[in-house]
Image: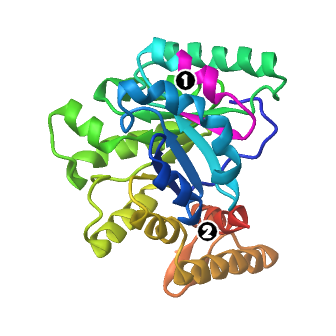
Amino acid sequence: MMSSQLPPPVWRSLLFVPANNRRFLDQAHRRGADALIVDLEDSVPLADKVAARSQLPELVAPLTQSGADLLVRINQPLRLAVADLEAAVIEGVRALVVPKVESAGALRQLADTVTELELERGLAVGSVALLALIESPRALPRLDAIAAVPRVIGLALGSEDFSAEAGMEPTAQGLLAPCQAIVFAARRQGVIPYGFAGSIADYSDPDRFAATLAQARALGLRGALAVHPNQVTLMNQGFLPSPQQIQQARAIVDGYRVSQREGAAVFSLNGQMIDKPVVDRAEQLLNQLQERR
């Protein structure tokens, strides 16, 4: 677990913004995303990476002016990653998004480098977290070790890269198992699972995308990465419980309190037998609302 005193983030939507696209950068704070990811990796050609890195300090204030957290996606391999860390470990950057994570050892090296930079720059140790992108089947047997690396606050499925590595299409059926594996490992290690079982590039059908997000939330995923502003509103809605779910959860919690006062461990509500695991799920749902305030 990370040593920072900052509370764990609650990110329903994390919007990628190319670090070399001034028009997108200027508009990003208006998109309503919980977090903005300045991308130094896939969307920036190699020839533009030095210039993209150099402008990070001047992006902090404008990108966070509407309350979004600022993240930076760094590059692989290590030579590029270290140059990105030198530029990105600064005041105002909440986390680094690490692509193509396949082992805990490589991630731990990056975490150690971040610590050195924080100490050199007078930043609180642990103030810059790591979000690990799972983009290869090779990472799946190592998810617990990856999630246990200091500074890691979440695991996120990179559905397009994962599917390409696996030689499959990014469909709900194919990505269900990795989504579940990420949820289970994240819960075991106390970090946050992100993603959904579908293509991140497919946002043409809002109803279908909303259904994909509803499935993700039901699986236990708590947010997702977005590549287009149109995805943000759907994510912000989709990763919160519906009014009906909230009403049901409150009824369950209230009913359980009454049953406890009456000396009963279970009770019936609307034709459903309510016991402690059902109450625990209801309390978790209501806690999500508290986290958003």
- Residue 77 in the figure: left or right of residue 56: left
Q: Based on the picture, tell me whether residue 148 belongs to the magenta stretch.
A: no
Marks 1,2: beta carbons within 8 A: no
Callout 2: SS:
helix
Which residue sits at x=63%, y=44%? 59
Tell me the quadrant of the picture where the N terminus can be found. Answer: top right
Residue drawn at (28%, 53%), measured in percent from left and top?
201
Q: Look at discs 1 and 2 and give the one toward the viewer.
A: 1
Q: Quadrant of residue 126?
A: top right
Of residue 65 and residue 290, the one placed in the foreground of this image is 65
Q: Which mark is residue 282?
A: 2
* Position of residue 223 measured from the top left corner of the image (x, y, whole percent): 50, 55
Residue 145 against residue 223 in the figure, above or below? above
The quadrant of the image that shows the C terminus is bottom right
Residue 149: in sight, yes or no?
A: no
What is the x, y in percent for residue 110? Answer: 58, 17
User: What segment carries the magenta color?
Assistant: 82-97
**Mark 1 vs 2, N-terminal side:** 1
* Residue matched to label 1: 84
Amino acid type, residue under disc 2 in the picture? Ala
Amino acid type of disc 1? Asp
* Horizontal and vertical percent position of residue 28: 54, 57
Q: Residue at x 47, y 17 (%)?
A: 80
Whole-percent x, y for residue 121 in the image: 80, 21
The residue that appears at 55% across and 37% down in the rendered structure is 72
Q: Is residue 42 left or right of residue 192?
A: left
When the figure is inspected, residue 21 is found, relative to residue 242, above or below; the finding is above
